[in-house]
Image (cartoon, grey):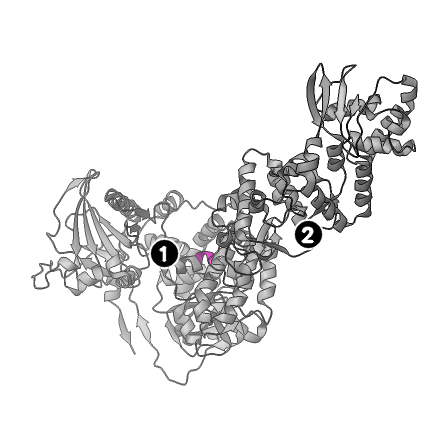
Amino acid sequence: MYGHNNNNGRRQQYGERSRNAVSPVDRAVVKAHSDLLATGQTVSAWSISQSALATLNAVSFESLGFHMQNVPSLYRLMLTESKGCILPPGSTVIDWESRELIELLAKVSLSGDREKCKYLLEVFDELWDDYFSDKAEAFCIIDGENKPFKSSLVSVLNDVKWVVSSLDDGLYCPKGLFYNCEELCLIFGDNAPYAVPKIRSVKLVTSIGFKTSVTLHDALSVLEIWKRSAKSFKASISQMSRFYLFIREEFVSSDQESIANLSSGPFIFVPLSSVSSSEVVSGVLLSSQEVYWHDNMVSTECEESKMLSNLYPSFHDFFVDECGVKENPPLLDYLAVLRHLSTINTPLEAAKKVFDVFVMWNDGLKSGALSSEDVIMLKRNLEEKNTKVLPTAQDKWVSLHPSFGLVCWCDDAKVADEFEELNNINFFCLCELNDEENKTLEVKVSFLMKNLGIPALSEVVTRKAIYYGTIDNDFETSLVNWALPYAQRYISNTYPEIYHQLKLAGFEKINKLQIVVVEMLYYQNVIKASNLVSNKRHESICLLQDEILYATCDSDSHSIFMELSRFLVKGDPELHLANFLHLVTTMNESGSTEEQIETFILNSQKVPKLSNEEPVWSIQSMDVMSLDTMTSATKCGTKRIFRPSSSSESTRNWPPASWQTAPNAVGLVNVEPGLVDQDGSLGHVGTNTVDAASVDQGDSLGFSQKDQLSHGLANVEQALPTGKRGEELAFNYYKNKGMKVVKWVNEASESGLPYDIEVCDDENRKEYIEVKTTDSETKDWFEISVNEWQFAVKKGEYFSIARVVLLSDKQARVTVFKNPARLCQLGQLKLAVLMSEKQKDEFVLC
């Protein structure tokens, strides 16, 4: 074999040596190979040969009488490194090596002297093209053909740690560093481990193995270096965008493990100051949990710097879908946002943003994104004196600390006005809200505020009764006693948990209920927790206070049942229970038999009977004289009402058969005859619309003249299906008109609302429809309750009455009265008040 040396090298040819002479050297090579593998060091033919020479105390293989190629184990390694060039017997190897260069390189590497290493690289860079480039390859001559492989010179330069890195103070093998070129700088900027100094010789770069391209593994390795860096990390947004773009493109063909590894730690560059995207600035690497994509609420520069939509606008899918970045900030971070808002805005200016934050917190609580522990932590923060982030109607910031007094949100503006002048109450102000936002507040945000300890005004306000004179209560007590067993069945069926608690207490609460009938009744609103009393007095006809139900002679059964429902169900009026009791009472007063009433309760109301073992609810009558009476500074005459009994033949015809709510004061709408005369099948109902805009006020309206209107007997079982059928026809009518949204609010059960149908057009304008149904073609009037008429006046153009006349099983006629309050003002409709026969005979003495 031949070795070649120019000046410092030598060219020699060797034959085969004695196997016995080579064996000790071969064993030393095998041991050196094993030792290097065990230590994890770089293994190459050259490194193994140097370790073996050190073991043999030899300076070179020539001093032992042969070349490296004569050692079998070393020879096989050289063949592997020469890309499988098999050397058959008699072949020749032309290589170049320099012992002096090897010793110089080893000395510089061991010294760790960065300046000497940089100088050595500069020398190689200067001389490589002219003196060393032709020595980068060795040749194996086999049958006259030259097969190249990496020369000993290049092997030495490849495998020794002697090149300085731009990132730290260590020395590296060339293959562990990048060549500093524009292509790589676009991806890494100045933050990659580049070889120092910068190399000019392209041949040197290629020969000794500097990295000139990037793989996904390279990019993730550099990222790990960035994470470990103790120095301030500097980069530009544009450069980091190219880095993330490269990773995103490489992820297309990579496994999920690589993506998981990337997202497991900090990898997102966030600058510490707001600058242009091309400017290199200091910044930090944050994890996907420490940043978010976008949020309109952010107002501080610190929080805005974590909003990736500002920094990397075109990388939403990469960061959010692939790397797990949240769309919005962590919910608890909004407390810091509120703190900042309270320092730069007045409470009323910031109220809308506070409302938006509470909506997000509430949604997070419902979805589980905000845990119960998070809510407890929020509450503790809000209770701190310095956490003044709650805006009030008085335009001041407060917290839930006791020093600020009572903090509550207003769900009743009229009641709030009564306490507005008092200093020890703060109304949590969430800005001027539209109808939709008010509904959100009442239905959704109220749940969160209850958990945070911010009550609604109605939850802290109670009513204090003020009454004058007590009178006999037998009638009212008998009425309640008669209705209580039906209420018991309703509570047992609808509110089983409440019923169970009452039963566990032996129905003690029911036994404590007292009925007090007084001559005059008023109440004041009181906030007991803060000892606040409103100065305003309200007249009342029926009122529950604690365990006493106060009533007056003017109390009707429905108002009594409403207050009774407060007593039975959590302190709030339960309209469905009151309606149920009133309906049963009306059937009884109208002459329905017990069997008819029971059939109606079981089949229509779906309220089953109680078991025979259940004790029946009842209360005891009280002696009027045992009650304490309040004195008044103003003397009032006692009012006595005489009620002559009516004969059994004059059956009570109040309320009418199709009543829906209490007959407190009922207006009757009288429809002008001849306005509508268009029939159609039930699939296509004949209709006409009466609109205030189309009415000529000068027209002479032909209303029918009647001295008396009679309801007749109240057949509730017939009236309810008739009303239900009319509502269904009106519901289908509006659906067929192509309205965007049509909602039948009573479809499942009676809602108690002052309307039956909600409709919404393409412009999201909502209209409320009250349906009035009859099967009499000659009937030109219908009932409307006080609540319905008040709602009609309030909504104006957005309220209509759909009058449905059932002509036959297959025909019906619909008349729509849009804005009936206005139509009454124009004389197109008229209101009337109808008295019952009983009331006609009453008289009053003062």
Dominant SS type (magenta): helix
Q: Quadrant of residue 88?
A: top right
Q: Where is residue 228 shown, x and y percent of the image? A: 69, 50
Task: Give the amino acid type for the residue marked by disc 1 in the picture.
Answer: His
- Of helix, strand and loop, which one carries label 1? helix
Left or right: where does residue 553 sit relative to residue 463?
Answer: left
Magenta-highlighted residues:
442-446
Residue under label 1: 582
Q: Where is residue 204 shown, x and y percent of the image? A: 66, 38
Separation (CA) of disc 2 from disc 1? 79 Å
Q: Where is residue 342 shown, x and y percent of the image? A: 51, 69
Q: Nearer the viewer, residue 566 or 314?
A: 314
Residue under label 2: 229
Residue 431 shows in this picture: yes
Most extreme residue toward the front is: 7
- Of helix, strand and loop, which one carries label 2? loop
Relative height, residue 126 to residue 522 (above, below): above
Left or right: where does residue 484 sit relative to residue 746?
Answer: right
Q: Quadrant of the C terminus?
A: bottom left
